[in-house]
Image (tube, rainbow, N blue to C red):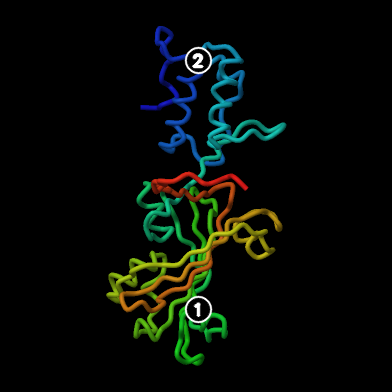
Amino acid sequence: MIILDTELERESETPLYEQLADLLEKAILSGELQVGQKILSEDEFVKKFHISRSTVRLALDILVNKCLLVRRSGKGTFVNFKLHQGLKELKSLFEVLVNQGINCTIEELSIKAIKPSKELSQKLLLKNNNNKVLSIERKFLVDKSPIAYSHIFIPFERIGSTNASYFEKQSSYLVLENIYRVKIQRAKQLISAVNASSYIANQLSITKGDPVLFVTRVAYDQDNQPIEYLEQYYRSDRFSFEIEMPRNKITYLYNQEE
């Protein structure tokens, strides 16, 4: 069934603009309308559903406010569905997208052994700076459009192998846990906003200087040793992080008197 072929219920207590907004949202979340796709014009919606232009605008306003649609002057209205990642548990980006039912493609840019810098050695607590690490550069694409670029560093001394082929187009966490039997216990992560460099802009198909979300993360194994260092850049127009914050009960009032 094509969602947007559903007729609006004229006798329903739900306003027509809310019904249309609901249909469009379902079409976006189901993938019927793809990210970046141009939707019907206001006039086309008027003819298709036999409703007024003001009803169409109200429906589109709802989805624009939800960041599901974006209006581009002189071009029309486009699907702007943002992917999101919750921060309640540790997962790789690949795992997050797969769990959301999103068809994600990993494009490998580089997999090689490198000599770590002094800074990288410190982050991974390497005993010997001459010990090499596995460097993995990759892009994540949804509907053939890049959403994130990542650079992963894994110390060979922790996995006891220099075979990099296992990591090709796979979640590094899944490979570490299932191939190398490493139990990833926890991670320390920092999220910040930065301007895209020329290199990052090229990888993400954006313009140099555009804002991106920058994540650095150190993952630790069962012995509390760093097993992976990650630098990841996300397109801020395509991705967001969701944090659930419980509030502890405060049993006293602050004294505001001087």
Q: What is the number of the mark on residue 115? A: none
Callout 1 crowding tier (Cα within 10 Å): few <14, some 14–19, many ≥20: some
Task: Describe residue 66's horizontal placement relative to residue 31 as left or right.
Answer: right
Q: Residue at x 52, y 66 (%)?
A: 216
Q: Residue at x 40, y 10 (%)?
A: 12
Q: What is the number of the mark on residue 49? A: 2
Q: Nearer the viewer, mark 2 or mark 1?
A: 1
Q: CA distance from mark 2 to mark 1?
A: 58 Å
Write down the quadrant of residue 200 in the picture. Answer: bottom right
Tell me residue 95's x, y (percent).
Answer: 37, 57
Q: Secondary structure at mark 2?
A: helix
- Looking at the rendered structure, the kind of residue marked 2 is Phe
- Looking at the rendered structure, the kind of residue marked 1 is Lys
Tell me residue 146's x, y (percent).
Answer: 54, 54
Q: What is the number of the mark on residue 123? A: 1
Residue contact between numbered discs 2 and 1, judged by CB atoms under 8 Å? no
Write down the quadrant of residue 180 in the picture. Answer: bottom left
Indicate which disc, 2 or 1, sits on the residue closer to the N terminus: 2
Q: Secondary structure at mark 1?
A: helix
